[in-house]
Image: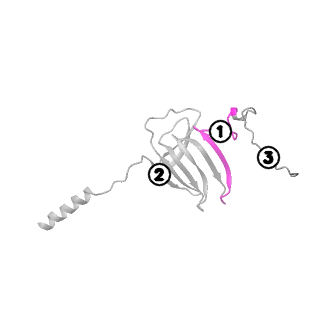
Amino acid sequence: MKRLITIAFCLVNGAIYAQDLPNSGFEKVRLIEPTKVIVAEIKQPTSKPDVKKDLFYVWYGANTIHATQGGYSGKLLNGQYNEYYLNKNLREQGTYKNGLKTGSWKDWNEDGTLLHKSSWKNGIILPDSTVSFWKRLPLIRKRKRQPEKADPKS
């Protein structure tokens, strides 16, 4: 009887001190395909995003990643996205927000050389020159002053 009480006490005591990992809300997905490995983060938004019919939404469902114009039927990608070649070199890297590309995206060749870099905002690619109109005006631009050279005659 003492053994049974001791075992029950240990089990109850162990359950009380068990650790729970904090739930950050992010779920990581790792997909291995014949030509690439994808590691993506998924976080369900607190409210349903306003879907625009002309944008492509990237989502996870049925153990694969899909891209659909104007809608989705699964968990939207939301967070860091990394795609690797089978030799473990990066293939593509960027961030999704509510299923849309956002921020800086980079593509690499299989040998690791940078192939392309682009900037995205809410699923729309930005032009290469993202300098604002006002900063391009000649009156607004500040000229760098050249340091004055010492007079060689003195």
Q: Position of residue 154 (x, y in %)?
A: 86, 51
Query: Which residue is tagged 1?
Result: 126
Query: Which residue is tagged 3?
Result: 148
Q: Position of residue 11 (x, y in %)?
A: 22, 61
Q: Position of residue 113 (x, y in %)?
A: 68, 57
Foreground pick, 77 / 149: 149
Q: Amino acid at mark 2?
A: Lys
Q: Residues within 10 Å of mark 1 (few under 14, many from 20)?
A: some
Residue sitting at x 44%, y 48%: 26
Q: Residues within 10 Å of mark 3 (few under 14, many from 20)?
A: few
Q: Which numbered tag is attached to residue 35?
A: none
Lower sequence index among marks 2 and 1: 2
Left/right placement of residue 135 relative to residue 85 reads right
Query: Which residue is tagged 2?
Result: 28
Residue sitting at x 58%, y 48%: 94
Left/right placement of residue 55 relative to residue 116 reads left
User: What kind of element bears circle 1?
Assistant: loop
Residue sitting at x 32%, y 56%: 19
Q: Residues within 10 Å of mark 2 (few under 14, many from 20)?
A: some
Q: Nearer the viewer, mark 2 or mark 1?
A: 1
Lower sequence index among marks 3 and 2: 2
Which residues fall within the magenta stretch? 110-134
Quadrant the N terminus occupies = bottom left
How far is mark 3 from mark 2, CA to CA?
Answer: 57 Å
